[in-house]
Image: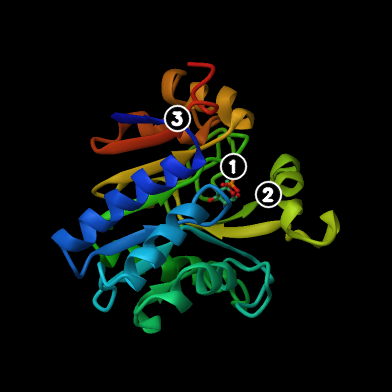
């Protein structure tokens, strides 16, 4: 594991963006595993800025996102498809047909999980996977559980996750109760992983993730076993370590 300890959120975003820009320069047809949430927004802003300055070309890039809420369409402004379109894809020269998220409106979610799992497997390991960290240690939407679920699956969101994510919705009751998420094996197959963590609220869970026992009760702890993990975390997030 490489730990990049940075001053604050802005530095975290810049350092993580540089890792992605280097990857894209090295391999212009990279498959990027992408994430949503506030931790990665700054990184996307840097990628857009770099693109506008003519420093990066996304035309051959493929993306595959970690997760999507069940029951929300891509037009709903709380869906992760909407987040990705508005915070990244609409501002860069990516081919939209090369951007992938689970379909939150799929009639048969089990079939949709199988489709998405096969898609991820077809990449033979995404080149670089971006991750944020949930307050309960979740990665993607892999919630604490008695077992690690390997493949793409439907998950019932924990009350704490619903509460944490309600800040993006008008009402807590509007937060979907289920999501489709990449499984732990899907994530761990990535050739490289970049985990971005910022803020005091994540300090305790980050310590557990990086230094505690590897357990499905702290899903992010599995990352200790990844051979090419970079953690980019700010001083507040690292304050317990
Ligand atoms: C959501 C996403 C996760 C993300 C987490 C943390 O639950 N499914 O992929 O890592 O939120 O979000 P934030 O960065 O806003 O704290």
Q: Name the residue under label 2.
A: 157
Q: What element carries label 1?
A: loop
Mark positioned earlier in the residue sequence (1 or 2): 1
Q: Mark 1 points at which residue?
A: 143
Mark positioned earlier in the residue sequence (2 or 3): 2
Mark positioned earlier in the residue sequence (1 or 3): 1
**C-beta proximity under 8 Å, tags 1 and 2:** yes
Query: Residue 128, relative to residue 56: is it above or below?
Result: above
Q: Is mark 3 on a helix, strand or loop?
A: helix
Q: Mark 3 points at which residue?
A: 221
Query: Who's the residue at 65% across and 66% down the image?
Result: 70
Q: How crowded is mark 1: few (under 14 residues within 10 Å), some or many (20 or more)?
A: many
Q: Nearer the viewer, residue 126 or 171?
A: 171
Q: Which of 189 and 76 is in front in this view?
A: 76
Q: Is mark 2 within 8 Å of ligand 1?
A: no
C-alpha distance separating marks 1 and 2 = 7 Å
In the image, taking residue 224 as reference, residue 159 lies left or right, namely right
Can residue 198 be seen by looking at this rendering? yes
């Amino acid at each position: 594991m490489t730990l990049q300890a940075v001053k604050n959120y802005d530095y975290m975003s810049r350092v993580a963006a540089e890792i992605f820009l280097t990857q894209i320069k090295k391999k212009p047809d990279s498959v990027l595993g992408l994430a949503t949430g506030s931790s990665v927004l700054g990184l996307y802003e840097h990628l857009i800025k770099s693109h506008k300055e003519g420093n990066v070309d996304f035309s051959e890039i493929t993306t595959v996102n970690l997760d999507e809420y069940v029951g929300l369409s891509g037009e709903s402004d709380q869906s992760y498809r909407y987040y990705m379109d508005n915070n990244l894809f609409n501002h860069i020269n990516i081919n939209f047909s090369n951007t992938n998220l689970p379909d939150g409106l799929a009639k048969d979610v089990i079939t949709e999980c199988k489709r998405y799992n096969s898609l991820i497997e077809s990449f033979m390991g995404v080149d670089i996977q971006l991750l944020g960290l949930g307050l309960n240690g979740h990665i993607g939407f892999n919630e604490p559980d008695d077992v690690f679920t390997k493949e793409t699956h439907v998950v019932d969101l924990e009350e704490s996750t619903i509460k944490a994510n309600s800040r993006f919705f008008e009402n807590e009751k509007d937060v979907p109760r289920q999501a489709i998420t990449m499984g732990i094996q899907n994530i761990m197959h990535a050739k490289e992983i970049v985990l971005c963590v910022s803020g005091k609220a994540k300090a305790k869970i980050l310590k557990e993730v990086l230094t505690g026992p590897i357990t499905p009760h702290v899903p992010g702890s599995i990352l200790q076993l990844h051979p090419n993990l970079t953690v980019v975390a700010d001083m507040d997030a690292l304050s317990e370590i």
